[in-house]
Image (cartoon, rainbow, N blue to C red):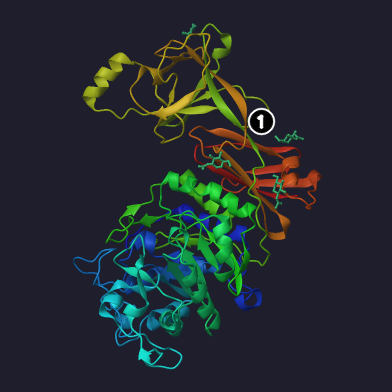
Amino acid sequence: MKIFVLITLCFFFFFGLSLYRVSSEIPDRELGHASLPPRGWNSYDSFCWTISEEEFLQSAEIISQRLRPHGYEYVVVDYLWYRRKVKGAYVDSLGFDVIDEWGRMIPDPGRWPSSIGGKGFTEVAKKVHGMGLKFGIHVMRGISTQAFNANTPILDSLKGGVYEESGRQWRAKDIGLKEKACAWMPHGFMSVNTKLGAGRAFLRSLYKQYAEWGVDFVKHDCVFGDDLDIDEITFVSEVLKELDRPILYSLSPGTSVTPAMAKEISALVNMYRITGDDWDTWGDVVAHFNVSRDFSTANMIGTKGLQGKSWPDLDMLPLGWLTDQGLNEGPHRTCKLSLDEQRTQMTLWAMAKSPLMFGGDFPYITGIKGTNKKSKVISPNLSEVGTSDTHVLGLTTCKDSKANGWSIEALDQDLEQICWKEKLGNRFEEPFCFYKRKTLLTADEETIYNQRYQGQLHLLAGEGMEFCLNASPKRKLTSKESKRGSLSPCKRDANQMWDLNTSGALVNSYSGLCAIANSVEAKVDSGGIRSWIATGRRGELYVAFFNLNTEKTVISTNISSLAKALPGKNLNRASCKCREVWSGKDYGVIKQSISTTVETHGCALFVLNC
Ligand SMILES: *[C@@H]1O[C@H](CO)[C@@H](O)[C@H](O)[C@H]1NC(C)=O
Ligand SMILES: *[C@@H]1O[C@H](CO)[C@@H](O)[C@H](O)[C@H]1NC(C)=O
Ligand SMILES: *[C@@H]1O[C@H](CO)[C@@H](O)[C@H](O)[C@H]1NC(C)=O
Ligand SMILES: *[C@@H]1O[C@H](CO)[C@@H](O)[C@H](O)[C@H]1NC(C)=O
């Protein structure tokens, strides 16, 4: 296993925990199944399908040591644990699976040596339980094409022996629905006909075996969203209810799922995906905002589920050390999200009370602390509660004395910032700044560049970000026009070159106009800003500001807006103490409003005790 440390992860997990009021002190059976959004680790984002027993148990050991004290309890083997890892085998290959005489999938003994001798996952589950964790597996819809082609007999797990009905023995070809193959793995699996006793007997034989192995969690794939198979979900849910062993029931993925579709199944399961697969791109993070809001508005978070509760699931967290979708390979690269984007993802998942399944590989995590206390989970209100001020860059004639408002400041030896000196209205707590970009040019390029743009600067939106301040997209601006400052990918273009002179004028090299900063209040529903509230342990409030824009933005809310989003809750306005979680900054007692500058793609999370 490769060594990769992401210090911030500890904070992430601790944070996820405190927002959820983890209750390891209360046994599940008192509260029911999945009384809180389930948390744990899943092998998919870091190993795709290729994980071995040794790698899995190593990961489980780390979860047990580092995250179990904070409520992370499930370790889940994702798909194709039955596929032999040999040349020619890949996600949609046919004929490489290990199946038993009844057409059921069994672990590939090459990757899962403890399964030899018909033991399935028994030994792995035992070891996982010995670590104080719960064991989960991924399963596909219906029956495998391999079992169908082999026309294996159906096991009657109630009576023993081959399933007989109407005076005959039933086989795989009697129950498999070839026309209902899994759309994204068409060679792998197909639905079974649950209207037939034999179809139901086959499904029962699978889940009874999982329970015998000691499985605590099944992630049932290709039955929901675009692949909906309501009959199979309904029957599997019934089987799980009959079993002695409580098994948590999870559905995946959830492409195109709406609250209306989810209402049909939420009481049958414990968690269900509400999006397609999430990977480590900003677009994937953004795609989870509206759907979270919609499920919150529809009151679907933490409703009644299978023998307990049911949770909309935003998918695994692809943070840390990862592989790529569909690859025959384990972890080999780090997460592509910036630190701000990772925080945004973690904050969004926690605000929406999604299950938290870490997807990356992480041999060790350090420094987690915190305590677990019981508390009830209240549905968050993900309606917008804030407003935003967008920093806007205007251009004006350099004769305007107001333009001399910029100053340069060295943050360290390599990093300089150019900031607008004046605070922009009351809302602005922090100045409006850009970072000076380092030149990343070859020696040749540098000579030409230096001649043309001597002493001039590229200005970045954020440290390390490749978005440059752009004065004019296309046309020449006249001194009369004032244009919203824009950021666009950095290029060598006169519109993006700036000169800061000793009077504090920031002169654009294309137009000769000077930059000036303004603020504009925007209504918080434009999709660029999200501002949400959730209630937590002992009634404290969590207020999250998310900035989806490519510009730094000041986001604000006031006590009246918060009170409106929490009907029936009495906010003691005289003493709302406020702290921001990620920075640790203490905002003291809030009388009227909370306001802060949020980085591009970043977030702020306030904890209020009112
Ligand atoms: C999210 O919803 C808002 C308003 O309901 C809409 O304006 C916006 O376009 C949506 N965003 C996406 C990415 O669909
Ligand atoms: C800075 O630039 C502005 C605009 O070109 C000019 O009016 C001003 O005199 C310059 N100040 C100095 C000290 O060069
Ligand atoms: C709070 O914010 C709302 C929405 O922006 C606004 O209508 C209201 O006047 C503000 N109230 C106070 C007391 O500032
Ligand atoms: C959520 O907040 C909005 C205002 O922001 C309010 O109108 C609505 O009633 C709240 N919903 C719930 C379920 O509390």
- Which residue is painted at 72% across and 41% down in the image? 561
> Left of 132 or right of it: where is 191?
left
Q: Where is residue 31 in the image (x, y as percent from the top left)?
A: 65, 73
Residue most extreme to the top? 399
Number of labelled discs? 1
Q: Nearer the viewer, residue 255 or 175?
A: 175
Q: Is the residue marked 1 within 8 Å of ligand 3, measured from its CB?
A: no
| Residue 497 seen from this side | no
- Seen in the picture, residue 223 relative to 240 is either above or below; the reply is above
> Left of 157 or right of it: where is 380?
right
- Seen in the picture, residue 330 relative to 200 is either above or below; the reply is above
What residue would you read off at disc 1?
A: 427
Residue most extreme to the left? 87
Tell me the quarter of the image containing the N terminus.
Answer: bottom left
Q: Position of residue 143 (x, y in %)?
A: 36, 74
> Left of 352 or right of it: where is 197?
left
Q: Where is residue 213 in the image (x, y as percent from the top left)?
A: 42, 83
Q: Nearer the viewer, residue 291 or 21?
A: 291
Q: What element carries label 1?
A: loop
Q: Where is residue 329 in the image (x, y as percent from the top left)?
A: 28, 61
Give the amino acid type for the residue marked by disc 1 in the picture: Arg
Residue most extreme to the front? 166
> Left of 149 or right of it: where is 274?
right
- Seen in the picture, residue 118 relative to 268 is either above or below; the reply is below
- Seen in the picture, residue 531 relative to 240 is either above or below; the reply is above
Q: Nearer the viewer, residue 413 or 354?
A: 354
Quarter assignment of residue 7: bottom left
Q: Nearer the viewer, residue 445 or 123?
A: 123
| Residue 82 seen from this side | yes
